Image (cartoon, rainbow, N blue to C red):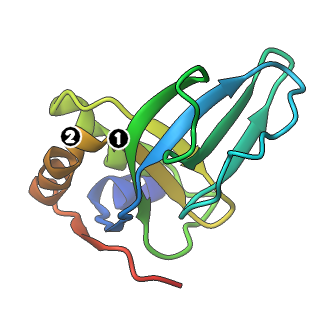
Amino acid sequence: MTEQTEQTEQQTFSIARYPETLAVVRLAPGAEIPEWAESSSIFSITATAAETSLVCAGRSVPKKARHQKPLTAFCVDGALDLSAVGILVRLLTPLAEAEIPVFTLSTFDTDWVLVPTGMADRAEEAWRRSGHTVAPAVPV
């Protein structure tokens, strides 16, 4: 085991919980971004040859759209080192042990974990038991 891996395994994180309800929406490959796709604490468009996925505010997603909601977003406070090893393992292991499904996203600076809103409090508890801190997100 490398020194960096050992440090990451012992590292705890400050995690911010965002208040709005989010949705993950599946669109056809190459789809235009619909007008109803509203921005929120995180707004993400991921396109592959097989699909286009959106993470957006859940309030305006049409019922007929293929989607999963309600979801609550958590993110690691502060910028993470892109060369660090094992960050998602440290974040996701407590949730897997608590049988909480996740949808993850990464930005240049940090990692985001979306969980079903009905399990958000359990996710907080699981992280706290693992030594992480969780607090409401501070508006930017």
Residue 115 tag number: 1
Residue 119 tag number: 2
Look at 58% across and 31% down and name the residue there.
62
Look at 35% across and 64% down and name the residue there.
19
Q: Is residue 106 visible?
A: yes
> Considering only vertical position in the picture, is 85 above or below 69?
below
Residue 114 is drawn in which quadrant? top left
Look at 14% across and 45% down and name the residue there.
122
Contact between labelled residues 1 and 2, with CB atoms less than 8 Å apart: yes
Amino acid marked by disc 2:
Met
Q: Is residue 1 visible?
A: no
Residue 125, x across and y down, in percent: 11, 53
52 vs 44, left or right, is right
Residue 98 is drawn in which quadrant? top left
Q: In the image shown, does 134 or 34 lie closer to the viewer?
A: 34
Please identify the quadrant where the N terminus is shown: top left
Residue 131 is drawn in which quadrant? bottom left
